[in-house]
Amino acid sequence: MAGCVCIVDYGGQFTKVIDRRIRELCVETVVVGREHNAKDLAQYGALVLSGSPDSVTSENVTQNDRDIFALGIPILGICYGMQLMNFIYGGSVGAKSIREDGQDSISITLEHSKLFHGLSTSEKVLLTHGDSVDELAEGFTATAKSKNEIVVAIENLEANLYGVQFHPEVDLTENGQKIFENFLFRISGLTKNFSLEDREQIAIQHIQELVGDNHVLVLVSGGVDSSVCAALVAKALSHDKIHCIHIDNGFMRKDESKLVMKALGALGIQIHHVDAAETFYQTSLGPENPLRLDQTIAPEDKRRIIGDTFMRVAEESIKGFNLEVATTFLAQGTLRPDLIESAGFVSKSAAVIKTHHNDTAMVRALRDAGRVLEPLSDYHKDEVRVLGELLGLPKEMVWRQPFPGPGLAVRCLCSDGTSNNIEIAATVEKLEQFASIGKGISSHILPVNSVGVQGDGRTYGYAVVLSQDYQSVDEIDWNHLFDLAKEIPMKLHKVNRVVFAFGGRITEQPEVVKTLMDKSVLSQLRDADYEVNSVLATDKLTSKISQMPVILIPVSFDRNQQHRSIVLRPFVTNDFMTGVPAIPGTERLPLSSLSKMIEGIQSNVENISRVLIDLTCKPPGTTEWE
């Protein structure tokens, strides 16, 4: 295994992105938890230590952690990994008065650093930390600092140890891949020995060995992941052993089920269509929470109901095929990010970002019983698209925009009509101290929470809504608004998003509106989603914007309790773990296209108070709002 890199997962949300970045460079990787015996790591050519939601303290640093650094092989510590490195060698780590969250520039202070070879003296990177190095350990040199003069990179040439207090694995670190190249090839002396084609054969072999002569039920939503999963299973197994089902949960896009059946049918895959909408609407969590799904407002409860109901419907479908349940496998298009964000992969320390519909407690129980087949669980979204083309799927299917399995349900924020007015007032007071917002721009707090990710953990925070008077959207200074969207969450820790509201300056605090996931509300959202996606298609923007969630929020700006608002979330990413908003007025989102979206929603969707656009990077805001 000398040509392989071992990634030690301390619970960071980007662990599998590290894995993917290294594999992109054709170097094989293995991922283990921090509990893995350090002596077993000596066989690898290099180690990478991940980030973590934990803090480095004498209480949680184990002897096994210390033994890792006695192995004498090259080590790259990322965020927590760098702090651990510094701490074990006698330095100190502590929390600063300011967090550093988001993309920012750092200064490389060591001219001949091996890790930063070929990079400029100023680099844009993703910072996500509250703790940082206070006192540098003996033998180490600081090689880079942030704008706040915080040490963000260290190295010890004699011990072959390197650390960075930012994430080189994500897109927001513009030359992160160059840093990995330097570590893998210049420092560790590894060679390229691994490819996507190799992994396809490994996946096919895994399917054949796991399934044997049993039957497989493939759950296809029609999205990229489940479609590639179906194609991979079809390549690995005899078609008479494969049974494909499309379950309509009632939260599909407009005419989505019809499109799914037509597209996959054209591939020669026979699909059984199950209309289970009423079953989903009427299901609850039972004694734990007797509220039906269409009466539930808690995001995690919604996801759990949808995930568990999905699996129960699948079980009933197996019976319809007259198969033996105990010897039938459920195939799912679960990807690496699904498992990472549900704390379901390697580390016991990983913080839950969200519970994925295809990674609920019930699915985990099936996985433990060996009854779930997840042939894509080692892949990220962009890799799945490439694999889909290798398998012969049409480009128009492979490069479709992602759509969550729970569908519109997770893009409909529900509320009982109340909000935490005390917490909102305190956040508003802090917001008013922002001199950089500038004259002519109003700022308010949306009275609802959305999920975000900051410092490797989940946050439920508020969104700041900016507004101003204007005659046309080309008068708006979008670059200034984008700068504010980066700055505000860094200084207001209760805030994880910044949005802009179209329709003129807001003069009063917006109100929360009671909103349940009934058919009329879903119809509102479905129609708004259709208007946006129609413009994306006609203006040929689908491939330029990675994903464009359309979210209904229970907020009124006009004192009408029957009105709600729509948020557009144009998102650009390669890894779907980090990303940036598509800024209006660029080739990704022309102002003419944006205007058509806004006008379409305002003209064709009833009872909409305002249309907003999300200007937040990920992190601190996740792609979805729930």
Image (cartoon, grey):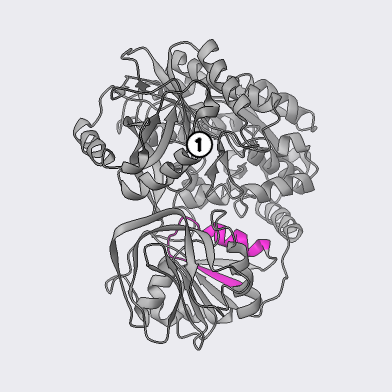
Where in the figure is residue 479, as x and y percent of width and height? 50, 40
What residue is rendered at 57% in x and 54% in y?
171
Q: Quadrant of the C terminus?
A: top left
* Residue 372 image position (x, y, % from top left): 57, 46
Taking the magenta stretch, the answer to whether it contains residue 17 is yes
Say how many tags the image has.
1
In the image, what residue type sits under mark 1? Answer: Trp
User: Considering the numbered disc 1 on the image, is that residue within a helix, a strand or a loop?
Assistant: helix
Q: Which region of the structure is painted magenta?
A: 5-24
Which residue is identified by label 1? 478
Q: Specify whether 420 is left or right of 527.
A: left
Q: Residues within 10 Å of mark 1 (few under 14, many from 20)?
A: some
User: Is residue 280 shown above or below 209?
Assistant: above
Q: Is residue 339 left or right of residue 23?
A: left
Identify which residue is drawn at 55% across, 28% down. 474
Query: Is residue 228 within the magenta segment?
Result: no
Residue 297 lies in what quarter of the image? top left
Which of 374/607 is in front?
Answer: 607
